[in-house]
Image (cartoon, rainbow, N blue to C red):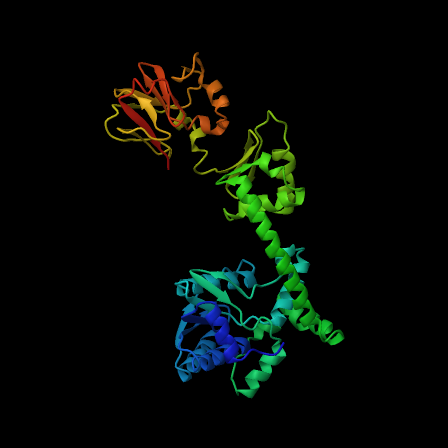
Amino acid sequence: MAIINATELAAMLEKCGATKVVLALSGGLDSMVLLELLHQVRQIRAYQLQAIYVNHGLSADAPRWAEHCANACAERNIDFVSLKINIDAAANVEAAARDGRYQALAPYIDSAHTVLLTGHHADDQLETLLLALKRGAGVSGLSGMARQRPFARGSLLRPLLHCERRHILAFAQQNQLQWVEDSSNRDNRFDRNYIRNEVAPLLINRWPAFTDTTLRSMQHLADHQQLLNHYTEQALLNCANGKQLNLTALEQYLPLQQDLVIRSWLAQFKLNPSSQWLLTLKQQVIEAREDAVPELVLAGYQLRRFQKRLYLLHAATELQGESEAAISCQLSWPMQSKLQLPAGLGELAVCHEQAAERLAMTRGQVTVVFGQLSLPFKPAEQVQHKPLKQWFKLWQVPPWQRSQIPLLLDNEKLVAVAGYASAISTLQADCWLDWLRN
């Protein structure tokens, strides 16, 4: 596809609701073409324009490239910013540079009406597909880069994504633009460079329309991914409640859709498990015998199953109640002011008005303990005492949460289980207990 013109770019920006446009300017061919197009766009509509050069610290030529960008922006009266970042040399350099660049640019995309432009084009999209095939990506990865997506507080737009590099080069030559060449682009040790310099030319030489037809296939995949996302979101609403996943509801869907729902649920917490890990979760946790309480670790989290629900627990916080320190703790409380609980479990408060989840109480000196599950207890509306652990089973409280629940004793008698039940009837109550959890 031929390169877009200033009028078409202005229409894209208007569709994004842009009032401020930030260009990721490297000084290379693609970004210099976008700089010139933005200069032309400003003759159509007055945008606040800013170009940002990011020095990754990987090339000795970076200061010269930054100067080139600064001069080009000065000629066009466009605000220019140069940033310096540090890249971990031990990491994947390509990925680290990309991630570092976006992190540096994010603060400048500071409103819903701010759009970041990058110079990715159709040849980049072809390279992205081949890299995705190499690593065995799914539909999302094979659909490539999106032309527009949310970014920071605004959005990211790739106006040249459907334009082939040869047309971009022709535009630059026609407008007598100057650009810099990064010698590292010839280093075929990097996978993307190898594809760009060796693989893609062979494919395009054999099939000249290969880039165009590839883009069409990738768009079909992107459309299917959008449809998958829609139905997965609907299923997730039916199955998930925060860090809990209802396995009974999940079973109503086809196995493949179950996998998508689990992945989407975990993605909310920035977790992206491998296919093998997902298979292990299903076989060893979800499908474990009914009386088991299995668990599986994933990036600082634990996943546990109880009563047909899957729980996502952060080991550093939500499992603190399993420690001996929390279980052995005893607190004396006169029920006057709020009581701060240990291990990040929140606080107890006494209220004058009845409300949902507040328990009937009579004001007085109580002792707050944790984990004494053998204590006998009879909620006010029940007819007989049972050990607390039996009530927890009836209330379907997961085992790992039981030692985190505050227990209120009056003369060594259990009178209230915070958040669940009280031995005091509403007629006897002169105040109400509220558990304010973190």
Tell me if residue 364 comes above or below residue 271 in the rendering.
Answer: above
Tell me if residue 377 comes above or below residue 288 in the rendering.
Answer: above
- Near-viewer residue (356 or 399): 356
Q: Quadrant of the N terminus?
A: bottom right
Asked if one can make out residue 277 in the rendered structure from this viewpoint, the answer is: no
User: Residue 98: percent from the left, percent from the top?
Assistant: 52, 63
Judged from this view, the residue extending furthest toward the right is 206
Residue 421 is left or right of residue 410, and the answer is: right
Judged from this view, the residue extending furthest toward the front is 427
Give the quarter of the image for residue 83: bottom left
Tell me if residue 277 comes above or below residue 343 in the rendering.
Answer: below
User: Residue 410: percent from the left, percent from the top?
Assistant: 31, 16
User: Residue 203: percent from the left, percent from the top?
Assistant: 73, 71
User: Residue 49: percent from the left, percent from the top?
Assistant: 41, 74
Asked if one can make out residue 256 in the rendered structure from this viewpoint, the answer is: yes
Q: Quadrant of the C terminus?
A: top left
Judged from this view, the residue extending furthest toward the left is 336
Tell me if residue 216 comes above or below residue 135 in the rendering.
Answer: below
Give the quarter of the image for residue 73: bottom left
Q: How many marks?
A: 0
Residue 232 is left or right of residue 207, and the answer is: left
